[in-house]
Amino acid sequence: MIMRDAIAGLLSAIKDEYVVCANGFISRDTFNAKDRPRNFYMLGSMGQASSIGLGLAIADPRKKVVVFDGDGNLLMNLGILAMIAQISPKNLIHVVLDNECYDSTGGQPTISSSIDLSGAAKGCGIKNVVKKGPSEDITAAFKDCLAKDGPHFLLLKVARDPSEKVPRVDIKPPEIAARFKRS
Amino acid sequence: MDAQGLKKSLNGLGFDFFTGVPCSLLGGMIKALGDGYIPSVREDTALGLAAGAYLGGKKPCVLMQNSGIGYSLNVLTSLNLIYDIPVLLIISFRGFAGKDAPEHLVMGKHCVELMETIGIRSKVCDGPEIEAALAEADRHIKDGKPYAVFIKEGAVS
């Protein structure tokens, strides 16, 4: 399954949750599939979508927070797994869409094909860790996470679409933040 | 200024979310914050956490040593400054006036101008100047801007 379709599947299960999207194609695919005020699109600051999601989950435990992270993003901020495990917020679902490359810069490989990201999450002590391959039902796995207390770490192996040409997020950054905060 | 007093001033201004990475100069402050302080693994991660907290309705403050400005620059410039996400930075000033261990000297020489270069207002403080700096910081934060309060050695006990 290509990442764009995986994201569309995940979004079909989203109701009132807050979704923090990593920069690059994850933000762009989410924006183009289903823009909503409760989506926060990272434009830069690679690696920090997961930090924002954790901060939001701590700030308001009543909000259910979903992070759409990428493999390159997570590798850049791998220490966040230790923080999520230590703080252990029940309302956080950390989804990693792993296409084993830096997609928006031309598909250069990350090192995620040869390391075990879900093992890292487990090793840190994150409560619920699930890994799904490209042919498995990822939407069902995500719905399970939404239904149960977290924190959840959901690693989804997805394929790169080399013809990916989706438009950029065309909302100004202050408006992305303001409407997310208001929502 | 003592750390309890600083904590009281911060709480009085409404700051209610504290994270960061320690410095020996901030040890008393972190101790005073107790369970209200969330240890982050890196300074940029602390800024990300603070941004999320702000989006969730909190008024965040990040504590770090000036060495952490290096890790922080990308988040300040491509998150805080472009999304209008404010944060109070309390930064310990190592390497002030060229007197410190070698690893602090280059950042000590340039940390204030680095903030100025990227458009973040700051104030370098000895103890008695902190209150006024916090009030000034709060005005910028209400406008959605980050502000850096540099704390010199001995300013907070």
Image: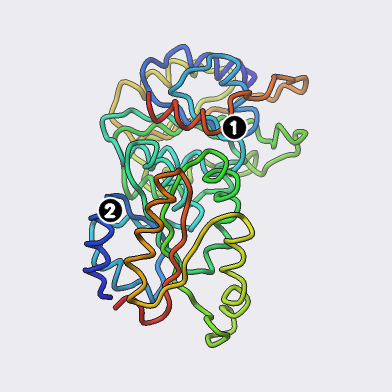
Give percent across and percent down for residue B93: 48, 74
Q: Give the numbered dot on residue A140.
A: none
Secondary element at tag 1: strand
Q: Is residue A129 depicted above or below B89 in this figure?
A: above
Q: Position of residue A161 (x, y in %)?
A: 72, 21
Q: Give the camera-side residue of B92 and B36.
A: B92
Q: In the image shown, does B46 or A80 lie closer to the viewer?
A: B46
Check chain identity for marks 1 and 2: say if they share one: no
Q: Amino acid at mark 2?
A: Leu
Identify the residue under disc 2.
Answer: B13
Q: Residue at (59%, 80%) from the top-left corner? A: B105
Q: Position of residue B123 (x, y in %)?
A: 47, 67
Question: What is the residue that sits farthest to the top in this orientation?
Answer: A12
**B19 versus A5 height, above or below:** below
> Can you identify the residue that label 1 sits on?
A98
Query: Chain ID for label 1?
Result: A
- The residue located at (24%, 55%) in the rendering is B11
Report the quarter where the C terminus of chain A lies: top left
